[in-house]
Image: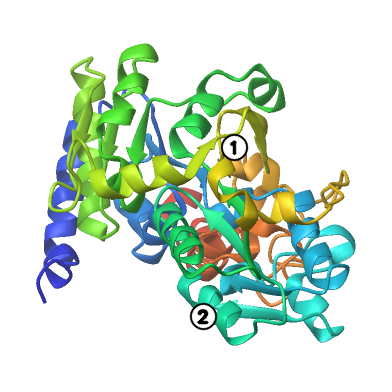
Amino acid sequence: MKYVDEFRDGQLARDIAAKISIEADPERQYNLMEFCGGHTHAIFRYGIPDLLPDNVRMIHGPGCPVCVLPINRLDTAIELAVTHGVILCSYGDMMRVPGSRKRSLLKARAEGADVRMVYSCADALKIAQQNPEREVVFFAIGFETTTPPTALVLHQAEKLGLTNFSVFCNHVLTPAAISNILESPEVRELGILPLDGFIGPAHVSTVIGSQPYDYFAEEYQKPVVIAGFEPLDVLQAIRMLVRQLNEGRAEVENEFSRAVTPAGNERAKSLVADTFELRRVFEWRGLGLVPYSALKIKQRFAAFDAERRFTLDYKSAQENKACECGAILRGVKNPRDCKLFGNQCTPENPLGSCMVSSEGACAAYYSYGRYQERERTIATDSPQSPQSN
């Protein structure tokens, strides 16, 4: 199968890993962050940490749109369904995320709210057409990948003259979050994070291209390698980062050249620019308030903006004090540092957003990582183990 099986070849993976081990300088540490949750999932699923030398460390970033949405925005979506009585349409991965008092969209639906899972924003538009007597709100979340489809349905709603359809916009921007991780005093106060380079997101980059990352290479002297989601993509990106660091370079390289171009998708970017504008500030779970990191709907489409159409009450909400999602999203801690992980907090009973989404670090760690680590610990502690002698 083209572009799938070729990038999952076990022998090639071992060959690349062997080259990484040879090229990695044993006298230095390599701290590399994969920003995208899809990469985190792939890293655990394919056991990539087991193939890397001990001094090449993968740090898991905040690249899961479900995970970074703050509680008060989720509470507002629930308010739309419960208090305002709208038909709230949401992607499935938002349904189980716990808001205040552990209330989720799924629980709100069980209590009688009309919350519907959709596979695309076009489905929400169709529901509005089928229910002209009801207000229908699409709960829009995601990075640059899912923003163009939301822009498209706003244009379609305008063309159709729908008066019962609106969008609750929560689209956020990748480059702003990377900048925040690198320079924000608030983030540094919450935990010092040594970072040597980034694996750039794949799907996001098909839209925005590789050019937006030039700033990080030039301003912060941090190399970026854009990579696909297959195991060979990730391993090759790691090797490219190790090579850049060894050579003292800080450049943007594109491993995912089969899908990503320097300029990205010009038509998609133009559609987004016609539909949205920057918010001056937006809250990210784990990162706090990040300037110019999210989009809002332009005045032209004000009639389809749920934040203008409804009177919404944004209340402050606190995270579960024992949950370490904030630190995990910043890469300061890993899931096993959380006392709730694997005990009270599991994919079946998630207490934090990182455990809900399949792209969240905790969910990926739980599914693919924690048992491997337990087996390695048992092997290390065993009397027959060379390490214990």
User: What residue is at 19 percent from the left and 67 percent from the top?
Assistant: 8
Which color mode does the image show? rainbow
Ranked by sequence position, the earlier of labels 2 and 1 is 2
Determine which quarter of the picture holds residue 331: top right
User: What residue is at 84 percent from the left and 68 percent from the top?
Assistant: 84
- Helix or strand or loop: what does disc 1 sit on? loop
Relative depth, front residue between 191 and 217: 217
The answer to whether any part of residue 101 appears in the image is: yes
- Helix or strand or loop: what does disc 2 sit on? helix
Determine which quarter of the picture holds residue 348: bottom right
Q: Nearer the viewer, mark 2 or mark 1?
A: 2
> How far from the left and from the top, in percent, is residue 30?
36, 29
Does residue 234 appear left or right of residue 19 in this picture?
Answer: right
Q: CA distance from mark 2 to mark 1?
A: 38 Å
Determine which quarter of the picture holds residue 294: top right
Relative depth, front residue between 29 and 121: 121
The answer to whether any part of residue 382 appears in the image is: no
> How far from the left and from the top, in percent, is residue 109?
78, 81
Residue at numbered disc 1: 330
Q: Say what amino acid the circle numbered 2 marks.
A: Lys
User: What residue is at 26 percent from the left and 19 percent from the top?
Assistant: 250
> How far from the left and from the top, in percent, is residue 356?
63, 66
Q: Say what amino acid the circle numbered 1 marks.
A: Arg
Q: Residues within 10 Å of mark 2 (few under 14, many from 20)?
A: few
All told, the count of numbered labels is 2
Q: Quadrant of the N terminus?
A: bottom left
Residue at numbered disc 2: 126
Vertically, is 240 above or below 233? above
Relative depth, front residue between 68 and 34: 68
